[in-house]
Structure formats: structure tokens, C-alpha cells
Image (cartoon, rainbow, N blue to C red):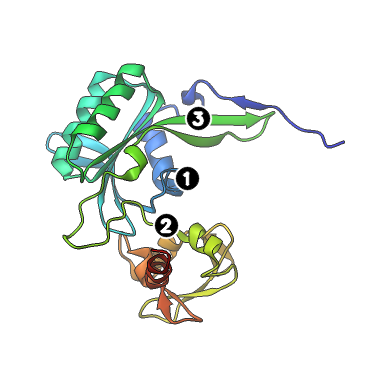
């Protein structure tokens, strides 16, 4: 018989991150792909403690695929009115297309407020309310998980796009493309305009120089840019097409 452990939730997040700004925000900025995988967006961090007038947004980021602006506000406690007000202030100050509120616990009234914002604000702006969970098995290291509580209904509310563009709020990611079999594990990707190559892995990351990393981090390291439109700058070696082009061709065929 296989011995199985018991999954236990760490109720006090400050056992893991004692301070929001000094501990949680730096950790999240380095592990942003965990949040990105949950919300379905390839998030690229631009700044932490990003200035908005006399205030600072915890994280200012962009969607690496579209360049749309994202504000992330962290709260290791229950939701409160103060942070809800900050969300709106930061969204306005940064002209954000997406606002993500990460909290230990979402109070019913604030959950309702986010739902109301998604139903009544401009269609180009979306709000996501997400609870932070941490689990252990026995004495294992703590494992984080983000649980979406509220988000735009079926993602039909869209981030701003040029007129005439294809209306899709969240474009499929590399894991979807692997599932479609338009790319395969082991395929070689080339950084656009260079000879730098990387091998595609099952989880959507790449393997290069004996190291696993996200495609975004690989491309940022090559270009030196703060963010890169990942799917446009990752070229599929066998076909000679960008991942963006391969994805679009497949999606157009399905319509």
C-alpha cells in the first residue's frame, strides 16, 4: 500500500510571509507564473511598489501576450474598504485593463462589490478577486495556491483592443497549444532575431543551458527588456512561424 500524507491548510499566511510589502510582494514578483497560470494570463512584472501619486501599487504588470496593463494589490488579511478604495485609485492612476486583488479571505460584501464592478464598469476593465491558500503535507515546505473568487463573467468583458481586432479577452496559452498538438514537447524555439534556442517542456516552460524557466524569462534575459510579447518573439524552429501565428491559424480554422 502507498503511504499518503494529509493535506493541511496553513491558516495564518504570516507564518509564511510575515510582511506584505517586504516578504509577499517580492516572492510573488519572482513567482508570478503561479498566479498567471490560475488566471490564464502570461503576466510580466514591470514594477513593485509602483508609484500612483502619493500612493504605491503593490505590483504593476502587463499581459506579456497583449501588453495590457495589470494592477495587483496584495492583502494577507480579510478584504477591507481601504484596499477596495486603493484598487480603484490604482486602476485609474495606471489606466489598468485588469485589476487583481489577492487576499487571505474575501468578505461577502467585497465579493459582491467586485461582482458589481465587473457588471457595471467599462467593458475594457476587469476585476479579479482571488484568495491566497497555502498547504502542507506533514512537514513539507508550504505550497501556495490561488483560488479565484470573482472574475469577469466568462471573460466576456474585454480588455481594450484596437477597433476591428479579434475579440478574445484571454488568448490560449502554450499549454493549450500543446494540447491541440500544434506544437510538441521537445520542439525547439528560437528567440526572434537571434540564434538563441530553447527546448519546449511539457509544462509550457523551456529548457536552456541546463535550466528550466518560463518563456517570458528566457526572452527577457536575451533581449534585456522588462517585458516581451512572448508569443510573437518565440519562433517555432520547425515551421519558422511565431507561436502567435501558429495559434491564430489554428483558432481561425476552428471558427
The answer to which image quadrant residue 104 occupies is top left
- Residue occupying image coordinates x 35% and y 18%: 108
Tell me residue 172's x, y (percent): 42, 57
Quickly name the residue at label 2: 172
Q: What numbered label is drawn on residue 133?
A: 3
Tell me residue 187's x, y (percent): 56, 73
- Residue occupying image coordinates x 24% and y 49%: 159
The answer to which image quadrant residue 105 occupies is top left
Indicate whether 55 appears above or below 211.
Answer: above
Q: Earlier in the sequence, mark 1 or mark 2?
A: 1
Tell me residue 214's x, y (percent): 47, 59
State left or right for residue 58 relative to residue 239.
left
> CA–CA distance between discs 1 and 2?
16 Å
Indicate whether 149 appears above or below 184.
Answer: above
Q: Nearer the viewer, mark 1 or mark 2?
A: 2
Q: Earlier in the sequence, mark 3 or mark 1?
A: 1
Quickly name the residue at label 1: 34
Instruction: Report crowding for label 2: few under 14, some 14 to 19, many 20 or more residues within 10 A (C-alpha).
Output: some
> CA–CA distance between discs 3 and 1?
12 Å
Tell me if label 3 and label 1 are in contact, CB under 8 Å: no
> CA–CA distance between discs 2 and 3?
25 Å
The local secondary structure at tag 2 comes to: loop
State left or right for residue 106 relative to residue 138.
left
Tell me if label 1 and label 2 are in contact, CB under 8 Å: no
Tell me residue 194's x, y (percent): 39, 80
Q: Earlier in the sequence, mark 2 or mark 3?
A: 3
Q: Quadrant of the N terminus?
A: top right
The answer to which image quadrant residue 96 occupies is top left
The local secondary structure at tag 3 comes to: strand
Q: Nearer the viewer, mark 2 or mark 3?
A: 2
The local secondary structure at tag 1 comes to: helix
Instruction: Report crowding for label 3: few under 14, some 14 to 19, many 20 or more residues within 10 A (C-alpha).
Output: some
Amino acid at each position: 500500500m502507498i503511504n499518503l500524507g494529509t493535506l493541511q491548510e496553513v491558516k495564518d499566511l504570516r507564518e509564511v510571509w510575515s510582511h506584505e510589502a517586504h516578504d509577499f510582494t517580492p516572492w510573488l514578483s519572482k513567482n508570478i507564473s503561479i498566479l498567471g497560470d490560475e488566471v490564464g494570463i502570461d503576466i510580466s512584472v514591470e514594477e513593485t511598489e509602483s508609484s500612483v501619486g502619493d500612493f504605491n501599487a503593490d505590483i504593476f504588470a502587463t499581459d506579456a501576450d497583449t501588453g495590457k496593463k495589470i494592477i495587483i494589490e496584495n492583502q494577507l488579511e480579510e478584504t477591507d474598504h481601504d484596499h477596495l478604495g486603493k484598487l480603484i485609485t490604482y486602476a485609474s492612476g495606471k489606466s489598468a485593463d485588469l485589476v487583481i486583488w489577492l487576499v487571505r479571505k474575501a468578505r461577502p460584501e467585497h465579493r459582491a462589490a467586485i461582482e458589481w464592478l465587473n457588471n457595471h464598469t467599462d467593458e475594457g476593465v476587469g476585476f479579479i478577486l482571488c484568495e491566497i491558500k497555502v498547504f502542507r503535507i506533514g512537514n513539507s515546505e508550504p505550497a501556495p495556491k490561488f483560488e479565484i473568487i470573482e472574475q469577469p463573467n466568462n471573460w466576456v468583458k474585454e480588455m481594450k483592443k484596437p477597433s476591428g481586432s479579434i475579440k478574445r479577452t484571454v488568448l490560449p496559452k502554450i499549454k493549450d497549444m500543446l494540447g491541440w498538438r500544434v506544437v510538441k514537447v521537445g520542439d525547439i524555439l528560437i528567440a526572434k532575431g537571434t540564434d538563441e534556442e530553447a527546448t519546449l517542456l511539457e509544462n509550457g516552460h523551456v529548457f536552456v543551458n541546463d535550466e528550466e524557466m518560463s518563456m517570458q524569462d528566457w526572452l527577457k534575459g536575451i533581449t534585456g527588456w522588462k517585458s516581451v510579447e512572448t508569443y510573437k518573439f518565440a519562433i517555432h524552429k520547425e515551421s519558422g512561424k511565431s507561436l502567435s501565428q501558429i495559434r491564430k491559424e489554428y483558432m481561425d480554422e476552428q471558427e
